Image: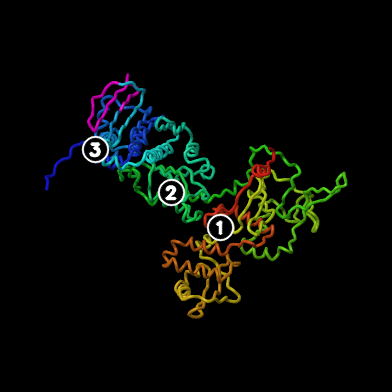
Amino acid sequence: MSRIHRLPDHLVNQIAAGEVVERPASALKELLENSLDADASRITVDLGQGGIQLIRVNDDGNGISQDDLSLALHRHATSKISSLDDLEQVSTLGFRGEGLASIASVSRMTLVSRTADSEHAWSVSALDGALEAPEPAAHAPGTTVEVADIYFNTPARRKFLKSESTEFAHCATVFERVALAYPHVEFLLRHNGRVVNRLPSESLADRVGRLLGKDFVAAALDIDEAAGPLAIAGFAASPSLSKAGRDAQYCFVNGRFVRDKLLAHAVRQAYRDVLHHERQPCYALFLRVPPEAVDVNVHPTKVEVRFRESQAVHQFVFHAVNRRLATTRTREAGQADTGDDRPADTDAPAIRPDTASPTPHYSAGGNGSASFAYRGGTRPLDLKAAEGGLDTYRLLFGDIESRERASAGVRPAGSDDGDVPAPQTGSPLAPAPALTTGDDTLPPLGFAIAQLHGVYVLAQNAAGLIIVDMHAAHERIVYERLKRAFDRDGLPNQPLLIPVTFPADRFEVATAADQAELLARLGFELTVLGPAQLAVRARPALLADADPVSLARATLAEVRELGASEAITARRDEMLATMACHGAVRANRPLTLTEMNALLRDMEATERSDQCNHGRPTWRQLSMKELDGLFLRGQ
C-alpha cells in the first residue's frame, strides 16, 4: 500500500471541478454569479457549440484590480468572506473562492478586467491550471471571462458531455434562472454568433412574462407578503395552468435559485385543495430571509439550502400562497373590457335576477309581413313551480332569498320605498336599465339567464357571458362548508325518520364498528345489523340531498383506506372531498332561476371557488369582444 502524501494543487482543483463544474452550464452559473456579485447592470453571454467550445461572460461590474487578478484564479481566494461570522451570514451568490480556480484547471481560461479608477485593463491567462503573468489589455470598466475547450485535458470527463443542443439547453436554462431573479439587470445571450435572448432592464412582472410566457402571467396570481424578517413575492399560477412535470417551478432564496424540499412541500400543500394530485403547480417565488437564517453552504453547487427555523419558513410560505389562492377571480369577473371597440346595442334586453328570459313580441311591419323584437319587460317567475326545488336548495344553501336581494339591491315587494309602487302579482315587471360596467350593485358573476342541458348555468354580467359547471361549483361550495363544520365541532347530522339498510361486506361492517367515533364526527350514525348488513340512522345535514347508501359506502371506503385515526386526521380533506362530490348537485338536475342565482352568489362568497376539489375549473367568462369575434361583428 502506498504512503499517504499531499496532492498537488492542480490535481486538487481538477477534483473540485468534478463537483463544481459538472458540465458547461455549471461553469456558466459560476461566472454569472460572479458578475452579479460585482454589481453588474449589463451582462453578455457568448456560447460556442453549447458551451463546450466557448463560454464568454462580459459585464460592466466593479472589475478586479491588477494586484488581485492572478490571485482570483487561486483556490479558496475570495473577497467575499474573511471569517466564520461572514460565512454564517453570506449575502453574496458566491463565497468559496474555488469556482474560477476549478474552471481554470479543466479549460483554457482568459480573464480580463478593469476597475473604474484604472487607466487600462489587465489580462491573465491560465492553461491547464498554469497561470501566466498579467498583461495590459484594452477593456471597458468591468470584467470578461473566456473559457475555451472545457475538459480538454480530462478526456474521461469530456466524453460524458452530451450533444451540442443538449448542453446548450442546460446553459439556456441556467441563463433564464439567473435572469429571472435579477430583472433590473440587462442580459444578452448569443449562441454560435446568433442572438438567442435579449432581456432589457424591466419589472419583475415583465421579466417573468418574457421568460415564462404571457399565458403564465395572465393566469398567475401575484404574491407579496411579509411577516417580520421574512418576505415573499412573485407569482403563483392558477390551477388551470398546471403541468405534468416540475419544469415550471422556480423558487429563489435571497436571489439564489434553489431546489428545496421544504419550500416545494409548502407550495404543494397550498395547492392541495385546488389541484389534481397528478398535476404540478406552476410558480415563480422569491423568498427573502435574513442571511444568518439560512445556510447556503450545504451543497457543492449551492442549489440546496438549510433554514435555521425551517418550520417557521414552511408555515410562512404555505399561508402566503394559500391565502392568495383562496381569493377567487369571481370578484374580477364583472369587470368589462373597456378597451374593445364593439358597437353599443342600445336596445339590448335587461336581465333581472328574478325574471325569466324575455318573451318575443310580434308586430305587423309596414309591408304587412310579421317582424319581432324583444321587449325590455319580462314575465314573472312562476314561484309555485319552483317551490319544491327551493325547499331542497334552502337546505343546502341556507337563506338564499335575503342574500340574493342584498347582493342585487332589490327591496322586498311591499316595502316602503318612497312613491315607487311594488309590482303587482301577475303583471310584468317594469323594464330594468341595461347592465353597465358602472353598475356598482351588479354581482361579479351577474345573474342567471338559463340552464344548458342540465349541466351548465348561463349567466350575464357586465363583461359578457358566464358559463358555470354547476356540479363542479356546488362541489367546491359544499366542500368548503364541510371543512369549516368539521373544524368546529364535527359535521352536524340529520337523523332519518326511517333508517336505510343496505348489504355490506365484512370490511365495511368492521370499519363501521371500529371507527364509530370518527364516523359520528363526519355526521354518520351507522348500526351493524348483522355480519353482512348495515343501517344508516343519520347522515350529514349538509348532504341531506345525497343518497345515504352511496354516501355511506364512499365514506367507509375512504376511512378503511386511510387506516389509523392519526392518518385520517392528516388526510381529512381527501375524505371530505369525497363526501362533497357525492353530496353536490348532479348533472341533469333542473334548477330554477332563483336556485341558479343562489349558486352564483355562493360562488362569489366561497374561497377557491374557481376550481372544484379535483382541480377542474368551475366557470369561464366569454367577454362581449370574444362573442363578437365568433360572429365577425365589426369586421
Quadrant of residue 597 in the image? Answer: bottom right
Expressed as whole percent of the image width and height from the top left, the position of residue 333 reads 61, 47
Characterize the local packing of mark 1: few (<14), some (14-19) or many (20 or more) Cα atoms within 10 angstroms.
Answer: many
Mark 2 or mark 3: whose residue is earlier in sequence: 3
Q: CA distance from mark 1 to mark 2?
A: 26 Å
Q: Residue at x 52, y 51 (%)?
A: 326
Q: Residue at x 33, y 37 (%)?
A: 27
Q: Which residue is mark 1?
A: 476
Q: Which residue is mark 2?
A: 246
Which of these two is toward me, 148 or 321?
A: 148
Residue type, numbered disc 1: Arg
Q: Which residues are magenta?
A: 111-136
Q: Is residue 613 above or below residue 129?
A: below
Characterize the local packing of mark 2: few (<14), some (14-19) or many (20 or more) Cα atoms within 10 angstroms.
Answer: few
Magenta region includes residue 166: no
Mark 1 or mark 3: whose residue is earlier in sequence: 3
Q: Secondary structure at mark 1?
A: helix
Expressed as whole percent of the image width and height from the top left, the position of residue 420 reads 78, 50
Residue type, numbered disc 2: Arg
Characterize the local packing of mark 3: few (<14), some (14-19) or many (20 or more) Cα atoms within 10 angstroms.
Answer: many
